[in-house]
């Protein structure tokens, strides 16, 4: 069941309740390893990455009680067992690397698998992570497969200034610092909404963290962490996805959104393609007035552009969704991924629909939108949000399209096909 058949052309309309943000859920799951107290998590989505992490917890001997119907997860990591020579951590997902601090704190050893790259977006370094672990006192050597880490006694607090604001490196720094001896400071910390949500959970466990949402995080280590009963917030990626699906199909979708204050730049980006986002009464909806059209800049000789970079820029994971709007909207626009060097090489798939999108360099695509589109069979790379962008384009074209290898969608969006069908789409897995 990894291909999607899409019978496109119907305007999507209705209401959707978004799920939790995978990129908050996964680091929070990894963080639970730092405590021996019971933890209850509410709103846990049924995602392939979540299942992989829960499976490793079961292998370690943790009590795991997951009810996907209610989204309630009860976890207790008490008498767990881990052997870096025997156990393997989940692969093909980035978040696996955030199991390291919990394993080091519990067992004095951990490992990093060779494939912790997640989506194939280009180079995804592990060096910034290894550097963080070493600064806290870990010794690192290359094993037969992957890296093996060991630490004697407690981790040692330290100050660090990273090369760039990396989401998972920031989270790993906080995970290490929470139980270290002394005060640690991270400069150039990432501040995405999911990083803030993760820090709020850490605080609920008893971690002492200052500077949430800024580029400087100060953490005072404590001797033990306690339990928590935590409810996940709504996923801004999923909110944007459904709003964009409404807009690209000429319909109107309303999505529950408790944090519109995170949206001003996202709203302006929609507006560049003629889509107005209205936030009202805890819901957001996309409104279009006729066919999508790229807003012309006043400055001469430049293209309309969308720049994606670490928060508070537009998040890079949202860029493919706006590229899909760019393909549909009449006019030209440039999309600039300032983070990854291999995330934009799927223009050839767009061209199978008859779209005109030009990869100008590894970081930039230009769309010449509004061209007549026809249904097509396309191949998605192993990139969650590109599978979605291809599905968006297919949904906007009358007729039968097929998205091959769309399974990555299940890494981030539970019940995605059910949700979109409830809006009037005709889509099925095959
Ligand atoms: C599980 C999780 O949370 N994954 C997210 C996390 O991955 P992840 O934490 O792996 O992403 P990073 O922020 O570390 O960035 C990924 C790569 O981009 C490059 N880089 C990044 C920033 C920068 O200013 N300069 C630079 O060169 C580096 O090669 C780096 O390895 O953040 C990414 C960027 O928001 C998102 O795409 C991923 O969905
Ligand atoms: C790239 C993503 O995830 P990961 O880092 O886990 O591959 C994503 O969530 O879009």
Image (cartoon, helix red, strand yellow):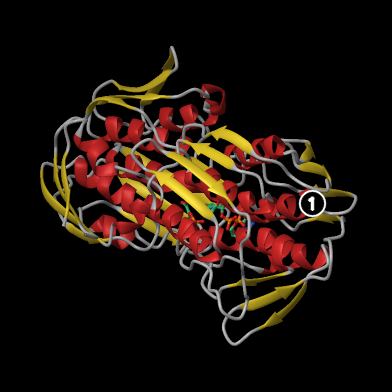
Toward the viewer: 355 or 312?
A: 312
- Residue 117 x/y as whole percent: 52, 66
Q: Is residue 183 above or below residue 351?
A: above
Does residue 255 appear in the picture of this structure? yes
Q: Residue at x 28, y 30 (%)?
A: 246
Q: Is residue 88 above or below residue 221?
A: below
Give the quadrant of the N terminus. bottom left
* Relative image position of residue 150 (x, y in whole percent): 75, 73
Asked if disc 1 is less than 8 Å from ligand 1, the answer is no
Left or right of residue 26, residue 45 in this image: left
Ligand 1 appears in which quadrant?
bottom right
Q: Secondary structure at mark 1?
A: loop
Left or right: residue 236 compared with residue 418: right
* Residue 165 visible here: no
Q: Residue at x 42, y 31 (%)?
A: 270
Looking at the image, which residue sits at the far front? 79
**Image-based side of 420 in relation to 254, left or right:** left
| x and y percentages locating residue 351 in the rendered image | 25, 57
Seen at 25% across and 51% down, the residue is 355
Given residues 183 and 10, the one toward you in this image is 183
- When asked about the image quadrant of residue 192, the answer is top right
- Farthest residue to the right: give it: 182
Number of callouts: 1
Q: Position of residue 318 (x, y in %)?
A: 45, 43
Q: Which residue is mark 1?
A: 179
């Amino acid at each position: 069941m990894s291909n999607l058949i899409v019978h496109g052309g119907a305007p999507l309309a209705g209401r959707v309740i978004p799920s939790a943000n995978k990129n908050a859920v996964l680091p929070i799951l990894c963080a639970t390893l730092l405590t021996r107290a019971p933890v209850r998590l509410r709103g846990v989505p049924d995602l392939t990455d979540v299942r992989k992490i829960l499976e490793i917890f079961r292998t370690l001997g943790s009590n795991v009680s997951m009810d996907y119907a209610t989204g309630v997860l009860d976890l207790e990591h008490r008498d767990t067992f881990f052997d870096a020579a025997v156990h393997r951590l989940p692969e093909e997902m980035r978040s696996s690397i955030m199991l390291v601090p919990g394993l080091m704190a519990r067992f004095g050893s951990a490992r990093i698998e060779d494939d912790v790259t997640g989506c194939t977006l280009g180079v995804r370094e592990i060096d910034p992570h290894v550097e963080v672990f070493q600064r806290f006192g870990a010794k690192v050597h290359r094993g037969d497969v992957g890296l093996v880490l060991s630490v004697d006694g407690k981790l040692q607090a330290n100050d660090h200034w990273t090369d760039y604001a990396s989401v998972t490196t920031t989270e790993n720094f906080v995970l290490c610092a929470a139980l270290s001896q002394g005060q640690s400071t991270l400069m150039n910390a990432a501040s995405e909404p999911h990083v803030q949500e993760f820090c709020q959970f850490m605080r609920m466990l008893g971690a002492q963290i200052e500077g949430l949402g800024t580029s400087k995080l100060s953490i005072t280590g404590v001797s033990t962490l306690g339990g928590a009963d935590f409810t996940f917030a709504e996923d801004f990626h999923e909110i944007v996805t459904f709003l964009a699906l409404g807009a690209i199909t000429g319909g109107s979708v309303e999505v529950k959104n408790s944090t519109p204050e995170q949206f001003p730049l996202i709203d302006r980006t929609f507006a560049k393609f003629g889509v107005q986002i209205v936030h009202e009464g805890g819901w957001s909806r996309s409104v279009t007035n006729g066919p999508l059209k790229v807003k012309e800049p006043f400055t001469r000789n430049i293209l309309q552009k969308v720049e994606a970079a670490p928060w508070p820029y537009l998040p890079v994971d949202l860029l493919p969704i706006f590229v899909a709007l760019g393909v549909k909207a009449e006019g030209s626009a440039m999309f600039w991924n300032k983070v990854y060097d291999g995330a934009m090489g799927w223009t050839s798939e767009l061209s199978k629909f008859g779209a005109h999108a030009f990869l100008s360099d590894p970081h930039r695509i230009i769309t010449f939108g509004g061209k007549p589109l026809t249904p097509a069979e396309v191949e998605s790379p192993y990139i969650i949000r590109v599978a979605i962008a291809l599905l968006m384009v297919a949904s906007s074209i009358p007729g039968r399209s097929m998205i091959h290898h769309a399974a990555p969608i299940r890494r981030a969006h539970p019940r995605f096909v059910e949700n979109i069908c409830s809006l009037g789409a005709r889509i099925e897995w095959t």
